[in-house]
Amino acid sequence: MSPHMRNAPARSTDCHVHVFDPGRFPYAAARRYTPPPATVSQLKEMHASLGIDQVVLVQPSVYGTNNDCMLDALKRLGDRARGVAVIDQTFGRDQLDDMFAAGVRGIRMNIEVSKGADATDALRRLSATAEALGGSPLLIQVYAAMPVLLACAPTLRTLHHTVLIDHFGLARTGSDPEKAGFSALLELIASPNIWMKLSGPYQISSASPDYADVTAIAKAMIATSPDRIVWGSDWPHTGGSARPANYRSTDLEPFRTEDDLRNFGLVGKWAPEESLRHRVLVDNPARLFGFRSD
């Protein structure tokens, strides 16, 4: 598979993918981009090539709060899949319970899609999401820039819900993990209710295609919280082209060209010990999302 990881452990879990099926489920009119299709069949082919057995489907922003495409994919994939939905203030407890029964295990807050969003907006949305969830067992998944996460850290630590941070916390610190407040991010993920997802290394790297500058960051995160780290491929890799000045959100935007096999192999570099890889790929996702691990 890779010089760093020869075989994927049984029940390895990809904790971050998106499914796009605009032919059956049209995109929201108010969206930031227009991706091509990335179907359940294509997802299954990709996972078969890696030896991945289980998956977490994350609601992408182009569908807004209409989770039908993700829920349909959950139904088609069965017990090997879980989901993370997006909601607004109109969702009631009955809807949350129905989604939980369908395999949804989290609610996503996508702060980064707004780009200009600040900590004040993030805290407002965080409070609203926590209030909407109430005593629900659903986790809160947060996609936000590292400065926003750090500004929200005191609130995140005190939430009664599990919090899962997307994409390395967007810790764009280069090869020096001590730059730009990274130590404060490590302090945050040391909190018992905070989890980190190592997904899409290109989200924080300036060293494509091998992403060597992510190694120190990933290793530091795993060392800080080995029992609360999960991995995700970020398939099908949105944002594959620069947006020109005359870009319109309805223009088709290709996916990034990524080597999924090579990227998956990086886990072996970040977690060289077999027992540690098993935690990241199997044990931790099983506890977080309710998968079988045996």
Image (spheres, rainbow, N blue to C red):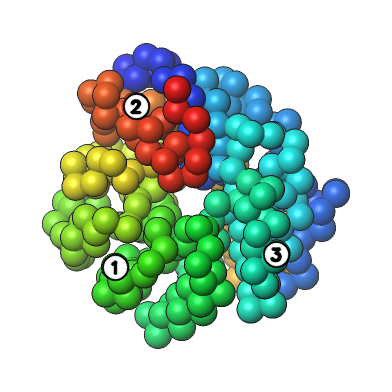
Q: Amino acid at mark 1?
A: Arg
Residue 175 is at least partly visible in this image: yes
Towards the viewer: 120 or 229: 229
Residue at the spot of label 1: 157
Q: Is residue 84 left or right of residue 33?
A: left
First in sequence: mark 3 vs mark 2: 3
Residue 199 is at least partly visible in this image: no
Residue 197 point in image, percent of width and height:
39, 48
Find numbered disc 3 in the image and state the secondary structure of the residue it sits on. Answer: helix
Residue 90 point in image, percent of width and height:
69, 77
Q: Which mark is residue 95?
A: 3
In three-dimensional space, the C-alpha distance between marks 3 and 1, rounded to whole angstroms, equals 27 Å
Find numbered disc 2 in the image and state the secondary structure of the residue it sits on. Answer: helix
First in sequence: mark 1 vs mark 2: 1
Residue 161 point in image, percent of width and height:
41, 63
Residue at the spot of label 2: 278
Q: Residues within 10 Å of mark 2 (few under 14, many from 20)?
A: some
Image: 11 above or below 58: above
Q: Residue at x 85, y 49 (%)?
A: 24
Residue with the most extreme right position: 24
Q: Amino acid at mark 3?
A: Gln
Towards the viewer: 126 or 48: 126
Image: 151 above or below 255: below
First in sequence: mark 3 vs mark 1: 3
* Front disc: 3 or 1: 3
Find numbered disc 1 in the image and state the secondary structure of the residue it sits on. Answer: helix
